Amino acid sequence: MSSSTVNHSTISITVSDEESDDRSRLLRARRKRRKQYYLSSRSKTKKDLLVRALRKVVRWWPIILFVPAIGLLLFEVSRVFEKQPDPSVTLVPNFGRKVSVGNLNRSDPRTRAVHGGRERCLKILPPEELERLEIPSVQSSSFPIDRIEYVSETDGANIHGNADLIQHHTNATRFNLFTGYQTILEREQSYKVNETAVVHCGFYSENGGFKITDEDKRYMQSCEVVVSTCAFGGGDNLYQPIGMSETSLRKVCYVAFWDEITRITQESEGHIIGEDRMIGKWRIVVVRQLPFMDQRLNGKIPKMLGHRLFPQARYSIWVDSKSQFRRDPLGVLEALLWRTNCVLAISEHGARSSIYDEGKAVVKKHKATPEEVEVQLSQYHHDGFPDEKRFNGKKALAEASVIVREHTPLTNIFMCLWFNEVVRFTSRDQLSFPYVLRQLRVLKNVNMFPVCTRKDMVNSMGHTRKARTQII
């Protein structure tokens, strides 16, 4: 048998550099075409989706708008007819209205920077001393005014008998049967202080309005120290005072003046005055026949004429309805009046010092018309009132939401003159306060305390709702 030999030979393939580059280019071109196809398809898909979505919106837009509107309506209806309050919401005591938790019932003291440190704005006595605090005994008067005679309808026979003159006053100003009809000459004479002062000070006629029941009058006549506020026209809620001592609870009256609109507004929300005429610590006095259409002017009566409403009171603290009083009233009297030997204490204005600057701000904020402000400031300029910014080294312009005073003949006549100014001119009492203070030159011992002291006395809550106009 013959044998054969098989030669296993190796075949080698030689690839040149040019062929390798051609293949790489082909691969890259293929990947690029795939990527372009993918991006083109994706863009086309997005456009198709957008077109379809727009078609759906165009077709169903009434339903798209209708469904949220129904949902919002149902939400509002549920709020109106809600019966149970949300336990997580802070409520105003005795009123059940939602308020900001930021200020209500805060009792922490306010402080200010002094010589690199901090000191309390209202330097009130410690609690144990407040409990032992007594009202000072009555001292003999050292004031230049011993007695005040309030002008009434029976005294003004000549004016009352002249119907043309009364009509002239009624048309030109807001004077009426409550205020009497003060002439310019009587206004000038009222600033000339004598032992016996004769002045218009409201309650001119039995037919002038601001009617209070005999029962309420008897209660008010029993008050020696009073904290008062008011809400007319269904305006602000009533915030319960806090921070008082047991001594103050026994010795101090808390009186809130309402009108029928406010009473009805609150009763409709379920807040009814008790048989003892109380809501919390406040005695509610419902006033009938308010004398002015302007509710701001009606509010000046309890604010400025407290000595006429509380004839036996020796001291009073006025608090605007937008604030919650949060300090012991006897402690406030001791800190601001007794310790400083003052008879009137009121806060400096926080923003301005001049009544002329204040007049511009009043117009800018639409608190009064330019014509009203111009008439008032023109009269003050004519009377020689300067553009001064200080009174006894402090601001002359006041922020009058808190007024602390002793009821003396001098402070009483001051409040009467101030009230007559807001009746004759604008209701913005900041404009007239410095003028009356300057014209009544004998009133010197006035404590113009800083803004931070006022903030230490009250929690500012803001206005709850706009007061409705009085219909006469």
Image: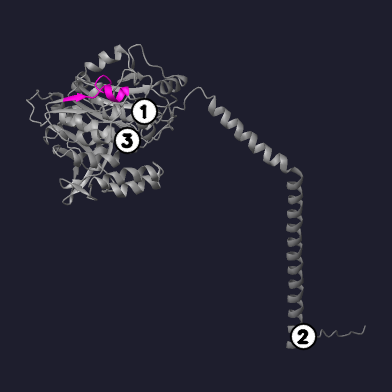
Q: Earlier in the sequence, mark 1 or mark 3?
A: 1
Q: Amino acid at mark 3?
A: Arg
**Secondary-structure class at tag 3:** helix
Label 2 and label 3: CA atoms lie apart by 108 Å
Measured as percent of width and height from the top left, residue 397 is found at: 25, 44
- Crowding at dot 3, Cα within 10 Å, few <14 / some 14-19 / many 20+, comes out as some
Q: In the image, 387: left or right of 24? A: left
In the picture of the structure, the residue carrying the numbered disc 2 is 19
193 vs 269: above or below: below
Q: Magenta stretch containing residue 150, yes or no?
A: yes
Measured as percent of width and height from the top left, residue 79 is found at: 53, 29
Q: Amino acid at mark 2?
A: Glu
Q: Nearer the viewer, mark 1 or mark 3?
A: 1
Can residue 298 be seen here? The reply is: no
- Crowding at dot 2, Cα within 10 Å, few <14 / some 14-19 / many 20+, comes out as few
**Secondary-structure class at tag 2:** helix
**Secondary-structure class at tag 1:** helix
Measured as percent of width and height from the top left, residue 311 is found at: 21, 20
Q: Quadrant of residue 249?
A: top left
Image quadrant occupied by the C terminus = top left
Q: Earlier in the sequence, mark 1 or mark 2?
A: 2
In the picture of the structure, the residue carrying the numbered disc 1 is 164
- Residues in magenta, as a range: 148-161
In the picture of the structure, the residue carrying the numbered disc 3 is 424
- Crowding at dot 1, Cα within 10 Å, few <14 / some 14-19 / many 20+, comes out as few
Measured as percent of width and height from the top left, residue 67 is found at: 67, 37
Label 1 and label 2: CA atoms lie apart by 122 Å
Q: Earlier in the sequence, mark 2 or mark 3?
A: 2
